[in-house]
Image (cartoon, grey):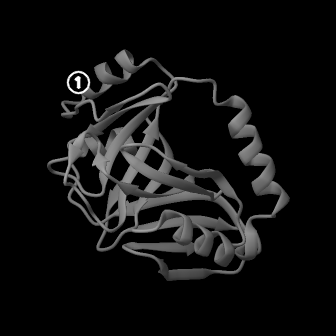
Amino acid sequence: MFKLDHLMIEVDDPQQTANRVAEFMGLPLAWPLMTKEEYTSIGVNFGDINVEFINFNVRFGRKETHFRGFSGIAFTDDVSLQVSMAKLDSAQLHYRIGEECEAHTTLPVEDDQIFPTLFLVKYHFDTTGWVQRLHDEFAACSGGKFNLGGFQSLAINSSLPDSAKSEFQLSSASKNQIVFKSNSGQKQLISDLIDNLEIVIA
């Protein structure tokens, strides 16, 4: 079973959009703006997960492929890339190598059939210190302006094979929606902050 790592949001100006979302939510950045040949990316720390704002030049190895708004879901696995591939093979899920670089390798899964794109990311460095920093900074802001608690669920507006539902713990719905626990007991629906994604605090 794979673990949710981050959501990917495609935008024209990652810096501007991430700053707007971070300010609205009262949350810290997960990483600063970084620019590579393939993309420009910046992340916002939502606690259990990060939300990445990205502008692609080459999307998972394919040029001239662009979307807008919530367009990808990244998962990690504690095992080697080869073992992860064997899991996908066993589940009869098609995958390919999307990007290979010094920091990570990505594996889009059934990307011709499922949208937002599901993909595995295998980090090639020890993430322990980074994960601890993210945890500490999220705790220091007390979950931001809406007192976000832990991640609860993610549903996407896409038909999913049963094997994908099982391996990735996703469900299909009429709209894309991520649900977080509320630490204050107050419920909140944020529907116009991120294109193609509702944020529910319940």
What residue is drawn where x is 29% and y is 42%?
60
State how many labels appear. Answer: 1
- The quadrant of the image that shows the N terminus is top left
Q: Position of residue 200 (x, y in %)?
A: 54, 74
Q: Is residue 96 above or below residue 136?
A: above
**Residue 7 visible from this viewpoint:** yes
Asked whether residue 202 appears in the rendered view, the answer is: no
Image spot of residue 153 (x, y percent): 49, 58
Along the line of sight, which residue is nearer the eye, 96 or 17?
17
- Which image quadrant is residue 68 in? bottom left
**Residue 174 shown left or right of residue 181 in the figure:** left
90 versus 17 height, above or below = above
Count residues near mark 1 (Cα–Cα under 10 Å), then give few for <14, some for 14-19, many for 20+: few
Q: Quadrant of residue 159?
A: bottom left
Horizontal side, residue 1 vs residue 18: left or right: left
Percent position of residue 92, x then y: 18, 30
Give the farthest residue toward the right: 140
- Direction from residue 41 to residue 171 in the image, left or right: left
Residue that mark 1 sits on: 89
Q: 150 or 8: which is nearer to us?
A: 8
Please report the residue visible at 44 percent of the width from the left and 59 percent of the height from the top: 154
Indicate left or right for 35 with 73 as reference: right
Inspect the image, locate mark 1, and give the three-letter code of the amino acid beneath it. Asp
